[in-house]
Image (cartoon, rainbow, N blue to C red):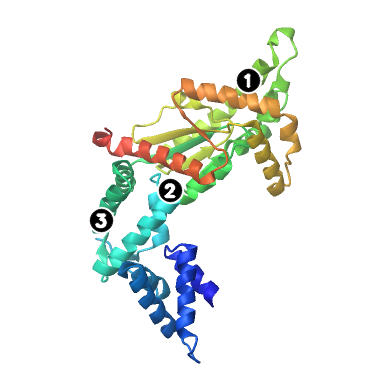
Amino acid sequence: MRGILTRSLQKIGLTFSEAYGVASTVRSQLAREEVIGSPRIRETVSQILVSQFSPETEERYRLSRGQPVWIRIHHKDGEGVWFSRAIFRYRLEICGITHSAAEALAHSLHERLVREYSTGIERETLHQLTCQMVLAEAGAHFAKNLEAWHRLTRANKTLLILIGGAPGVGKSTMAAHLATRLNITRTQSTDMLREVLRTLRSPEKNPELHYSSFEAWRALDDSPDRGDMPARIEEGYNRQADEVELAAQALLERSQHEQFSMIIEGVHIRPSMIQRLTLDPDVIVVPILLTVSRKKTLKRFFKGRSLVTSRRGSKHYLDNFDAIWHLQSALTLDAKASAVAAIVNDEEEESTSVRVFSLIASAVADHVLPNQGE
């Protein structure tokens, strides 16, 4: 069918009009044949692609239509794995390379492996080849990030990622995305830490733990010298964060001791927390503050959350929106004072992901490539 062929040709890089034109030509050439098999169709398509475009275009089509071409990656220990374009693309994306650019590089590398390394390739040779391609196609910055991730797998270092931000800005979603891409199996939410602390501390002893972060001010006494409302919001939040931070620090120290990488996310991760950590130099700590630049965007995030979370709808957050927005402003000022990156998470999910991965990869490079930071 012409529509199916058109979509197949678009997947190898042709525009819709180009793909539709080729499909129409194929149908015209084969219209008088009574019985047409798949090999005949592929042969005709290949001939047209070579004549109208290039042999390289025809090769992309042939590889996409044929049986999967598996390339073995050999390891020094004797064990090997098969090359995966999807896994390779993920490796490029965690360097800060966009999805489309990573997809193009993965495709180009696979074609080269098929041409030049059909019997397999050593892992180090593959890495060197990859660095050369990334350097040529994406630039030195991304090639350095790729080398940093490569060395981190062989270094005796622990990666700890701290994601803070006001409620609703996308911390847990980002944490799950990073954990998947970076193969980090341990993540922790500070909301869960607060829930645990609530069971251990009575409302009389630590009343601030028994409110949401943006309502912890309600635990303060009502003395008139408590100041204006923004100051009360910050004081209540900081009292709650002080308690939760102790538990978070204990987790980080355990992570350091057992040498496992970890992601901790939550509203209680204040940017200034980085100044209070006392971890070994072999631990790579990457603090990130997620923010939202526009009020209507954050309100839309809350409304979206209510569609997937039955326990907490959007109304509670929207009713306290001014307090949440002020909390974000206070965290942003804290990030600036603590030299912690504040990344805006607005409309473009991929753009946010690229900035976060680029930040983490640069931090890793600063630790494992100390002489290549210029």
Marks 1/2 in contact by CB < 8 Å: the verdict is no
Q: How far apart are marks 1 and 3 (CA)?
A: 52 Å
Q: Residue type at mark 3?
A: Leu
User: Around disc 2, counting alpha carbons within 10 Å, would you say few (fewer than 14), some (14 to 19), or many (20 or more)?
Assistant: some
Which image quarter holds the N terminus?
bottom right
Residue 158 at what x, y percent from top left? Answer: 38, 40
> Which is more N-terminal, label 2 or label 1?
2
Q: How far apart are marks 2 and 3 (CA)?
A: 20 Å
> Which is more N-terminal, label 3 or label 2?
2
Give the mark toward the camera: 1 or 2: 2
| SS for dot 1 | helix
Q: Residue type at mark 2?
A: Thr
Q: Is residue 5 above or below residue 282?
A: below
Query: In screen coordinates, is 13 left or right of 111?
Result: right
Q: Quadrant of residue 116?
A: bottom left
Q: How far apart are marks 1 and 2 (CA)?
A: 37 Å
**Picture residue at 37% right of the left edge, 61% below the top:** 107
Residue for badge 1: 234
Residue for badge 2: 98
Q: In this view, does 166 lie above or below 154?
A: above
Marks 1/3 in contact by CB < 8 Å: the verdict is no
User: Around disc 1, counting alpha carbons within 10 Å, would you say few (fewer than 14), some (14 to 19), or many (20 or more)?
Assistant: many
Q: How many labels does the image show?
A: 3
Marks 2/3 in contact by CB < 8 Å: the verdict is no
Q: Is residue 296 above or below residue 59?
A: above
Q: Quadrant of residue 197?
A: top right
| SS for dot 2 | loop
Q: Which mark is residue 129?
A: 3
User: Around disc 3, counting alpha carbons within 10 Å, would you say few (fewer than 14), some (14 to 19), or many (20 or more)?
Assistant: some
In the picture as drawn, the residue positioned furthest to the bottom comes out as 34
Q: In this view, does 21 lie above or below 154?
A: below
